[in-house]
């Protein structure tokens, strides 16, 4: 679904920001292959991520035996309706199993969400968290089609994107509304001009078929899978298309598959408001004085006033850019993705109240995939392209005005921002596929579905609806009473034990298990 708020993959470089050559054959190709399942992957040392992946350095070695990352390119049909036609190169990364060969189960494939996040950069960033799983699996992730090094969707240039993300995303009058719509139309037209070849072929159903090809090329009889955020939607679509090929699978930070774009965005408004409420309560309940408010309500009132003031008078940010109302809103949202980022939010707000928008702008840049050198990853273009190709509804300004009261009621801070985000696909070049994904998977193996009660981006209720939609005997729901986007990376022992027990030993937790 098209939402302004991005996956946790967008936040991977946040701490570094605050503290401080392409793979061969990886682009599009016109090669044709009668049976792509027979291809041999040429695994090599991984290069540094390119700009579309977010930049940075080559992944550091992992501890223990076979502790190096290797990269390869999988050749897949550009158009799955013509499997013998042109191909696309999909970038893969792998860490070989650290355990005994006799104990190896197979490959465990990760998708960390977005859509639009680079799995080739995300897996090494989270590698330490999955060390236990590596004892019996090769850990594998990938850049989905249209993402990173996998024929990335390209829209506007860096200078244009700076302006795009500075615009007023919550218009107050006709002039601002026209400016927002014109900017969105210009962005969408640039995507078509620069990425016409790939835009019709980035639907989640395409990526699910890529997953099954990946499974076969890696030599596994079943797909063992760990999906996070949008990765749960991708996993659900895979289970629907290939129920008999589902192996051991975990869905964490679960997208609600029953909702359309409007319903999903409204749910996010509630989710981010809940996270903001929890942040405010946490700030004032600590042993140290909360520098951004005397009470939880005072914290939220001061944030609301800051955003209102920024609408008319931005603060100095990262020169030459200013901290606008839109940038501050996205920066606050970014910090709510993880409780670990809450101290950054406190520092950023405290700094902004003193007239300096630097930290909130760093948070906003992380949300939008902007590096310190001013270059953008293709996170946002890919996010828009995949969502618009998936989602059938096309919303008008009249639709937004109709739902604005509900969105404002859901969140005074984030409601309008999310409501106006609904117009993002209105002028998109490719028709959307469906109102919502089909994840019915009768006959599939059990899938562990984890919902976090404090998740801002994929509200808790989505986990139960995913479990129900997968079908009786397939979806097994587990609840984590915590904060942030996702559960496994919280390092909660109960969650870790349940996930590791299933993926490593095949022990399915009892449905309805609660971890806190």
Image (cartoon, grey):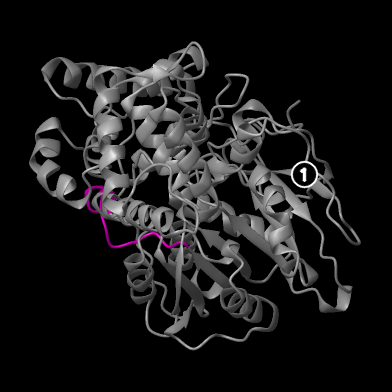
- For label 1, the residue is 71
Q: Nearer the viewer, residue 182 or 310?
A: 310
User: Where 165 sits versus 83, above or below?
Assistant: above
Category of crowding for the residue at label 1, using alpha-carbon neighbours closer than 10 angstroms: few (below 14), some (14–19), many (at least 20): many
The spot of residue 435 in percent (x, y) is: 25, 52
Range covered by the magenta-colored residues: 253-265
- The structure residue drawn at horizontal position 47% and vertical position 71%, both measured from the top left corner, is 450
Taking the view exactly as shown, the residue that stands out farthest to the right is: 65
Q: Is residue 118 left or right of residue 441?
A: right
Q: Nearer the viewer, residue 216 or 107?
A: 107
Magenta segment, principal secondary structure? loop
Q: Is residue 439 left or right of residue 40?
A: left
Q: Is residue 246 visible?
A: no
- The structure residue drawn at horizontal position 26% and vertical position 27%, both measured from the top left corner, is 427
User: Where 247 sits versus 286, above or below?
Assistant: below
The spot of residue 276 in percent (x, y) is: 35, 51
Q: Is residue 226 left or right of residue 251?
A: right
Q: Is residue 255 left or right of residue 320?
A: left
Q: Is residue 176 visible?
A: yes
């Amino acid at each position: 679904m098209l939402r302004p708020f991005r996956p946790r993959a967008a936040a991977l470089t946040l701490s570094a920001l605050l503290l401080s050559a392409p793979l061969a054959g990886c682009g599009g190709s016109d090669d044709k292959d009668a049976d792509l399942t027979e291809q041999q992957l040429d695994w090599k040392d991984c290069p540094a991520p390119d700009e579309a992946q977010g930049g940075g350095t080559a992944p550091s070695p992992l501890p223990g035996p076979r502790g190096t990352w290797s990269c390869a390119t999988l050749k897949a049909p550009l158009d799955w309706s013509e499997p013998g036609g042109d191909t696309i190169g999909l970038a893969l990364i792998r860490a070989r199993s650290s355990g005994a060969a006799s104990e190896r189960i197979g490959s465990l494939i990760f998708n960390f969400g977005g859509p639009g996040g680079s799995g080739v950069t995300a897996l090494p960033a989270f590698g330490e968290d999955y060390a236990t799983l590596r004892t019996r699996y090769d850990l594998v992730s990938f850049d989905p089609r249209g993402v990173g090094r996998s024929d990335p969707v390209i829209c506007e240039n860096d200078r244009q994107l700076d302006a795009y993300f500075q615009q007023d995303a919550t218009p107050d009058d006709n002039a601002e509304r026209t400016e927002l719509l014109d900017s969105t139309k210009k962005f969408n037209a640039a995507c078509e001009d620069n990425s016409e070849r790939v835009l019709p072929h980035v639907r989640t159903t395409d990526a699910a078929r890529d997953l099954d090809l990946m499974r076969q090329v890696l030599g596994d009889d079943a797909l063992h899978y760990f999906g996070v955020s949008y990765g749960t939607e991708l996993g659900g679509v895979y289970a629907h298309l290939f129920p008999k090929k589902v192996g051991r699978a975990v869905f964490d930070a679960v997208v609600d598959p029953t909702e359309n774009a409007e319903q999903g965005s409204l749910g996010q408004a509630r989710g981010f408001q809940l996270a903001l409420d929890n942040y405010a309560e946490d700030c004032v309940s600590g042993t140290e004085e909360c520098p951004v408010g005397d009470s939880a309500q005072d914290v939220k009132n001061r944030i609301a006033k800051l955003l209102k003031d920024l609408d008319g008078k931005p603060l100095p940010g990262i020169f030459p850019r200013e901290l606008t109302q839109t940038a501050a809103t996205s920066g606050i949202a970014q910090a709510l993705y993880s409780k670990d980022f809450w101290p950054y939010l406190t520092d950023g707000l405290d700094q902004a109240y003193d007239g300096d928008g630097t930290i909130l702008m760093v948070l906003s840049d992380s949300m939008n995939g902007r590096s310190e050198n001013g270059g953008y990853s293709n996170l946002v273009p890919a996010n828009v392209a995949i969502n618009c190709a998936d989602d059938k509804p096309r919303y008008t300004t009249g639709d937004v005005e109709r739902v604005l009261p509900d969105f404002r009621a859901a969140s005074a801070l984030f409601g309008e921002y999310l409501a106006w985000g609904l117009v993002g696909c209105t002028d998109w070049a490719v028709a959307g596929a469906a109102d919502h994904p089909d994840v019915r998977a009768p006959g599939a193996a059990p899938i562990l579905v984890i919902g976090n009660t404090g998740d801002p981006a994929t509200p808790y209720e989505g986990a139960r609806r995913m479990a129900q939609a997968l079908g009786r005997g397939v979806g097994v729901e587990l609840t984590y009473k915590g904060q942030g986007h996702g559960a496994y990376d919280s390092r909660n022992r109960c969650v870790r034990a349940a996930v590791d027990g299933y993926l490593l030993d095949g022990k399915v937790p009892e449905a309805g298990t609660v971890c806190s």
